[in-house]
Amino acid sequence: MKMNNRFIYGILSIVLAAVIAFIAIPAVTSKTSSTCEIVRMKNAVTRGTPITAEDLELVEVGGFNLPDSVARRMEDVAGTYAAADLYPGDYILPEKVSSVPLSSDLSLNEIPDGMVAISITTQTLATSLSDKLQGGDIIRLYHYDDNNVLEPVSDIPELRFVKVLSVSDSKGLDVDYTTPPEEDEERQQTATITVLATPEQAMLLTRYENEGILHVALISRGNEKLSKELLERQAEILSTLYGEGLEMSDEDLESSMNASGQQTPGGEGSQESTTAASDTSGAAAPDTEPEETSGNE
């Protein structure tokens, strides 16, 4: 019985060795020894610079562990823009190139569909949160209108949770408050704040900036989960005010803006001041005031 077991084990060992020798090893060898042509950088190219055919070369390399997304044709890369600094010998992966020109501000390269980037000016140090805003902050905007005697300050439902893309000085240069300035370096001051907005929010920002003063309040910083929740709440508010599609004509949007006090659920007093500010713009006032006058007569 023992001899039979040893015989079986011997046969299995021989079969296993044959499989390894004649099947496994040739398969691995053929895979590791296979080659293919890929596109590789020949010259160094800095970020944002167009990539030309002279900067590239076709080379034959081993296909083992080669990413499937690596560029294999020159025409797929020539004419694109470097999304990062590229050096001779670099393989070309999709994330390393861009089909559109890049700006110096990375946040402007990834604006979601249906959104816009818009800048608002800061009239005073207080309105800009004492030059402490940073990109990625979630802010709330308040409107001050000294023409509205009863309620000069209004909370704007459409602008309760807005994401800051960047902060710039008076020359349009990005301001970075995350690092203190050098000893001989003059501290930059906030002149404009660029935010991510829907077209409806952009129209309101343009309107309120020209009707009074916009003050900024910081709501969240460095908490991605909370920021996402706040932006979702803002989307719900906009959906309630303007509908699910958020695709309105300019006339419908202006009408909604002028009547925002009546549209907002809950009848908040802040909307009354918003309506009062809308009347000062002259959009709805000419239609209502003459009727009131004629009625009085």
Image (cartoon, rainbow, N blue to C red):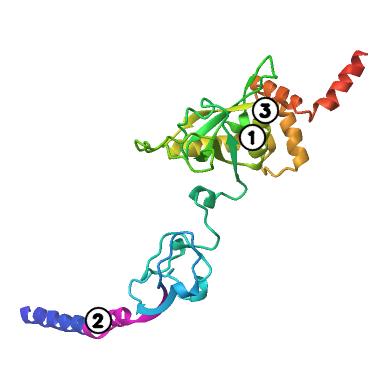
Q: Position of residue 7 (x, y in %)?
A: 11, 83
Q: Position of residue 282 (x, y in %)?
A: 79, 28
Magenta stretch, main secondary structure, is helix
Please name the amino acid that badge 1 sits on: Leu
Disc 3 from disc 1: Cα separation: 18 Å
User: Residue at point 76% right, 38% down?
Assistant: 252
Disc 2 from disc 1: Cα separation: 68 Å
Residue for badge 2: 25
- Callout 2: few (<14), some (14-19), or many (20+) C-alpha neighbours within 10 Å? few
* Foreground: disc 2 or disc 3: 3
Instruction: Point out which mark residue 205 bears.
Output: 1
Please name the amino acid that badge 2 sits on: Ile
Return the disc, 3 or 1, that comes first in the chain's sequence. 1
Please name the amino acid that badge 3 sits on: Thr
Return the disc, 2 or 3, that comes first in the chain's sequence. 2
Query: Taking 29 as reference, is 143 above or below it?
Result: above
Quarter residue 70 falls in: bottom left
Query: Taking 179 as reference, is 277 above or below it?
Result: above
Quarter residue 290 falls in: top right
Q: Residue furthest right?
A: 297
Read off the magenta span: 21-39
As helix, strand or loop, the secondary structure at mark 2 comes to: helix
Q: Position of residue 122 (x, y in %)?
A: 56, 31
Quarter residue 2 falls in: bottom left
The verdict on residue 126 being magenta is no
* Foreground: disc 2 or disc 1: 1
Return the disc, 2 or 1, that comes first in the chain's sequence. 2
Residue for badge 3: 264
As helix, strand or loop, the secondary structure at mark 1 comes to: helix
